[in-house]
Image (cartoon, rainbow, N blue to C red):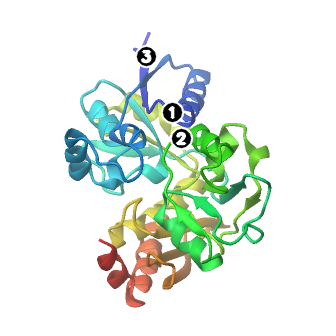
């Protein structure tokens, strides 16, 4: 009997939901599997209150990994060290430049890619009172929210979904903005007050999708996870990731992109904004699904021609 496939995952409730989903698909295909929890720098960082200084050892790791790899670095190291065979990530956390020897082998069908509002008393964004506190640590969300309501107070909030909901209930804020996918996966859709349209809130690159990573030389793991790949998700997210790659941004920079299939073509929208939401640059294009990277690069170049580089340089 073939050795079991060891799946590496973060230990949050959402990450484990994702890892168990992958495990269930592999088990159904006849593979023996095991899930191994790996604590990442990002997990440790969430335990530090916003504004509180980081411990020296953590600050060094953050500086080395950069914001783009905080929830990924230790899992990829375990994969390269052959301690695990398959890594399951939220795709929006996975940097576009992967370490040598690793491959993004499969992207399963995407969940809802939209962002959602969860308010304490069922208010919509429009009906929240002036100066209401809306919690999200995402600069991408904060900048786009300011174009919708610049009178609200947008505050950073770390922690997993359960932690954020508890903070909402105890009055730390009046509303949360979160990814619909995580709320759905954890069975909390009933808490959602409103969904943002893609025009109101362009999502993070890869939002709602899972990324399954293997070693490039591990044919057994690669063949096992390939059956989970969904071209109608994988091709659009390749276009989105191409925008991010060309712009050189990470999850802490207000860059957004969303693509979807239309027959054999892709439709892609990209966005770059400054921190106060007073300058929002958008670009869109359509192209054949056979060339997602070319489409992503074209949208990124359009954003750059409109001034995206100056905005991103000023933020960095």
Q: Position of residue 145 (x, y in %)?
A: 60, 71
Judge depth for marks 2 and 1 and give the one in front.
Answer: 2
Compare residues 26 and 9 and report the one nearer the observer.
Answer: 9
Image marks 2 and 1: residues in contact by CB distance under 8 Å: yes
Label 2 – label 1 distance at C-alpha = 7 Å
Residue 54, compared with residue 294, is above or below; it is above
User: In the rendered view of the protein, which quadrant contains the N terminus?
Assistant: top left
Q: Residue furthest bottom?
A: 306
Count of numbered badges drawn on the protein: 3
Residue found at x 58% / y 44%: 164
Secondary structure at numbered mark 1: loop
| Label 3 – label 1 distance at C-alpha | 23 Å
Asked which quadrant contains residue 305, the reply is bottom left
- Tag 3's secondary structure? loop
- Left/right placement of residue 235 relative to residue 250 reads right
Q: Which residue is mark 3?
A: 4
Residue labelled with disc 2: 160
The first of marks 2 and 1 along the sequence is: 1
Q: Dot 1: within a 10 Å radius of its alpha carbon, few (fewer than 14), some, or many (20 or more) residues?
A: some
- In the image, residue 14 lies at what x, y percent? 57, 36
> Relative to residue 174, is residue 144 depicted above or below?
below
Q: Residues within 10 Å of mark 3 (few under 14, many from 20)?
A: few
Q: CA distance from mark 2 to mark 3?
A: 30 Å
At a point 68% along the width and 44% down the height, the residue shown is 169
Q: Earlier in the sequence, mark 3 or mark 1?
A: 3
Residue 12, numbered label: 1
User: Quadrant where the C terminus lies?
Assistant: bottom left
**In the image, what residue occupies the spot 56% across and 73% down?**
144
Q: Give the structural element (helix, strand or loop) at label 2.
A: loop
The answer to which of 165 and 27 lies nearer the viewer is: 165
């Amino acid at each position: 009997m073939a050795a079991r496939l060891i799946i590496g995952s973060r230990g949050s409730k959402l990450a484990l939901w994702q890892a168990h989903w992958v495990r269930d698909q592999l088990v159904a295909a006849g593979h023996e599997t095991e899930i191994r929890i790996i604590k990442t720098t990002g997990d440790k960082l969430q335990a530090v209150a916003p504004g509180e200084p980081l411990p020296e050892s953590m600050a060094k790791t953050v500086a080395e990994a950069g914001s783009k790899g905080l929830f990924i670095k230790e899992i990829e190291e375990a994969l390269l060290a052959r301690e695990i065979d398959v890594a399951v990530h939220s795709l929006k956390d996975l940097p576009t430049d992967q370490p040598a020897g690793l491959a993004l082998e499969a992207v399963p069908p995407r969940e809802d890619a939209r962002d959602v509002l969860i308010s304490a008393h069922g208010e919509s964004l429009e009906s929240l009172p002036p100066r209401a506190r809306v919690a999200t640590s995402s600069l991408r969300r904060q900048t786009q929210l300011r174009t919708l309501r610049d009178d609200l107070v947008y505050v950073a909030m770390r922690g997993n979904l359960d932690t954020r909901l508890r903070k909402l209930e105890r009055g730390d804020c009046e509303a949360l903005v979160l990814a619909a996918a995580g709320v759905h996966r954890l069975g909390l859709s009933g808490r959602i007050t409103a969904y943002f349209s893609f025009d109101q809130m362009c999502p993070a690159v890869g939002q709602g999708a899972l990324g399954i990573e293997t070693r490039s030389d591990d044919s057994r793991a690669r063949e096992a996870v390939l059956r989970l790949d969904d071209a109608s998700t994988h091709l659009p997210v390749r276009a989105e990731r191409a925008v991010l790659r060309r712009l050189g941004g990470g999850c802490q920079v207000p860059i957004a992109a969303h693509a979807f299939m239309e027959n054999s073509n892709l439709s892609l929208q990209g966005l770059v904004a400054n921190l106060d939401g007073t300058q929002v640059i958008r670009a869109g294009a359509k192209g054949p699904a056979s060339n997602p990277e070319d489409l992503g690069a074209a949208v990124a170049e359009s954003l750059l021609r409109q001034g995206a580089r100056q905005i991103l340089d000023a933020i960095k």
